[in-house]
Amino acid sequence: MTNIQSVDPWVEGPLKTFVAEAGARLALLMTPAGQVIAQHGFTRAVDVMAAAALGAAIVASTGEVAKMLDEEQFSALNHQGAQHGIFLAGFDSPRGRMVSLVVYGPESSPGLVQVFFEEFTRELVAACPAPETPKKVLAADFERELNESLATLFRS
């Protein structure tokens, strides 16, 4: 049984399917700024915050490298270790750009994660409700909204 925790209920079904099919040990769906939308497998809020911050930083830095190389953007990044792999990819949705960070073990592979990630993004985009009227995000609101999101994710 998976332990998907999400701020938006429409994310849960596609994420649950992706985690099961791709063999993901950990999964994090967030905005490019690191605001958490949903997570699977994390047991501590501090780990979610650290992964989101690091994932957002990697996306930002690889975005700058892409600009230096006259690329629009890089779509995915994979790091393979002896026991774990990390897949980090961004995609566009009706709610704006989203980023997914996935940790998988030796029972999966980069190719398998990539195939199911493409299916996940299609399902997620199809499930996404129409975007709300965009609101201006102020720096003063960011910490409060982050804390509210984390509280929602870890509510029993």
Image (cartoon, grey):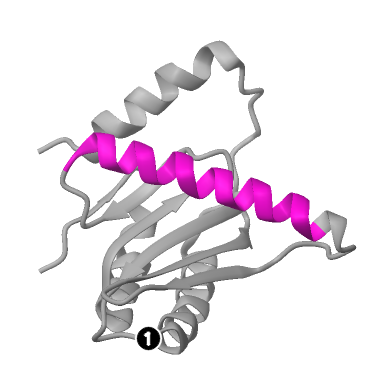
Query: In front here: 22 or 62?
Result: 62
118 left or right of 25? right
Secondary structure of the residue carrying numbered label 1? loop
Is 47 covered by the magenta stretch? Answer: yes
Kind of residue indicated by mark 1: Ser
Count neighbours of disc 1 (C-alpha within 10 A) and say few if under 14, some if 14 to 19, many if 20 or more.
some
**From the image, which quarter does the C terminus lie in?**
top left
Magenta stretch holds residue 42: no
Q: Magenta segment, which residues?
A: 44-66
What is the x, y in percent for residue 17?
Answer: 30, 75
Q: Which residue is drawn at 18% across and 40% down?
A: 44
Q: Residue at x 47, y 76 (%)?
A: 117
Q: Quadrant of residue 70?
A: bottom right
Residue 31 location (% of width, % of height): 54, 45
Q: In which quarter of the image is residue 2?
A: bottom left
2 to 154, vertically: above or below: below
User: From the image, which quarter does the N terminus lie in?
Assistant: bottom left
Residue plotted at (35% across, 37% down): 49
Q: Mark 1 points at which residue?
A: 109
